[in-house]
Amino acid sequence: MIYTGGTIGMKQDPMKQALTPFDFSQILQEVPEMRKFAFRIDSFTFDPLIDSSDVEPSLWQRLATLIRDRYDDYDGFVVLHGTDTMSYSASALSFMIGNLTKPIIFTGSQLPIGVPRTDGKENLVSAVEIASAKDFDGHAMVPEVCVFFDSLLMRGNRTTKVNAENFSAFRSPNFPALAQAGVNIKYNSSLIRKPGDWDAGIVANTALDTSVSILKIHPGITPGVVRDILLGEGTRAVILETYGSGNAPTKEWFLDIIREAREKGKIIVNVTQCLYGSVDMGLYATGKALKEAGVVSGSDITTESMLAKLFYLLGKSGDPDWIRDRVAKNLRGEMSN
Ligand code: ASP
C-alpha cells in the first residue's frame, strides 16, 4: 500500500484551520477490518504527504520506480491518492508501466477516514481485496491500473472526476466498469486487459516530456489566445478540447494558425468537451477542416488520459510523425478505435 496523501488521510489542523494529511499508522487504526485479511500488507508513505492538487510528474516517476523495484515482492499494489488528480495519476501510470501483470489500484475518499460517515474505509478495504484477487490459473484477476471508488472498479485511464461532493466522485464515461463491489465483487472478466506474456517482466518508462498545452475551444476565442497556445515556444503538443464530435470554428484565421503550428512540427490532437461519446472528424465540415489541417483524432479518450499519453510519447521520441501515429492508436485501453 502506497500512501501519497489526499483527503482519505487528512484531519482538521486547528492551527491552519484546514485539512492536512496525517500519517499512515493512524489510517490503519481507523480500519481494524484490515487485520481480518489473511495476507501481508506492507506500507510505503511518501514524504511529504500531499494534497493531490500538488501532484507533479515527479510523483508519477517515483511511483513507477517504486512499483518496478518492489514488483516481485507483492501480488498487487494499492495507491492512496487525493481525488483531485487521481485520474491524471492513474492514466500516467498506465502508460509508464509496460508489461503489467499485477493490479495497481488507486483509491481515496471524499471524507477523511476518521470521520464517522467516511467512504474511505469501504474504498480502502475493497481496493485491497481487488489488488489481491487471483483467477483460476493463479494470475491476477485485474492486471491493470485502475481507480476504485464508491463500489466501482474502473480502468484508470478511462476515469474522470465528476463530483466534488458525492461519494460517487468518478465516472468512466466511455468504458464499462471492470468490476462492481456489492455482496460479492463481480468482475467483468471479458473487459479486463490481460498481458500478452505473463513472464515478460515489468518496464517503467520514466522519461516524460510535459511540453503540452490544453486549449478549450469556446465562443469568442481570439486569434491572440490561439496563437499564444498553439505557437508557444515551449509547446510541442496541444490538446484541442472541441465541441461535440470534434468540431471547432471554421474561420480562416483559426485554421491558418493550426496549419502553421502543424508545419512547425507541433502535434495537435482533438478531444471532445463532451463527457460521453467520441470525436469523429468525418461527420461535419467543421471537423473535416481540422482533419485536413493535420489534427489527430483522440477518439473517446479523456483529456486527463490524453495529457498523460502525450507526456509519455513526447518523452519517448522526438519524431512528430511517430508520436502522431501512436496518439491515434489504442495503447493501454484508453480509447476505442
Ligand atoms: N484536495 C484533495 C486531494 O486531491 C481532495 C481529495 O482527496 O478528495 O488531495
Image: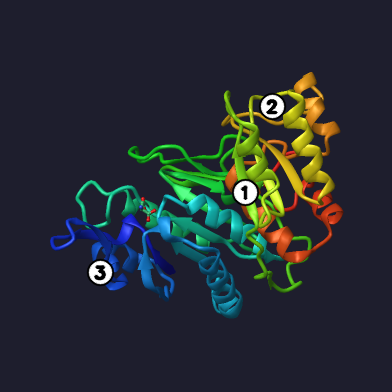
Farthest top residue in view: 284
Q: Is mark 1 on a helix, strand or loop?
A: strand
Say which residue appears at 22% left-offset and 59% top-offset: 11
Q: How far apart are marks 2 and 3 (CA)?
A: 50 Å
Residue 248's label in the rendered image is 2
Whole-percent x, y for residue 320 in the image: 82, 54
Whether residues under marks 2 and 1 lie with C-beta atoms below 8 angstroms apart, the answer is: no
Residue 8's label in the rendered image is none
Return the disc, 2 or 3, that comes first in the chain's sequence.
3
- Which quarter of the rendered picture does the N terminus lie within? bottom left
Whole-percent x, y for residue 55 in the image: 46, 61
Q: Quadrant of residue 312?
A: bottom right
Instruction: For residue 323, say whether it is visible.
Output: yes
Does mark 1's beta carbon lie closer than 8 Å to ligand 1?
no
Farthest front residue in view: 224
- Give the total of numbered labels: 3
Return the disc, 3 or 1, that comes first in the chain's sequence.
3
Badge nearest the viewer, 2 or 3? 2
Q: What residue type is labelled 1?
A: Ser
Badge nearest the viewer, 3 or 1? 1
Say which residue appears at 39% left-offset and 54% top-offset: 108
Whole-percent x, y for residue 21 in the image: 29, 64
For disc 1, the marked residue is 213
Q: Distance between the residues labelled 2 and 1?
A: 17 Å
Q: Distance between the residues labelled 3 and 1?
A: 39 Å
Q: What element carries label 2?
A: loop
Q: Which amino acid does label 2 sit on?
A: Ala
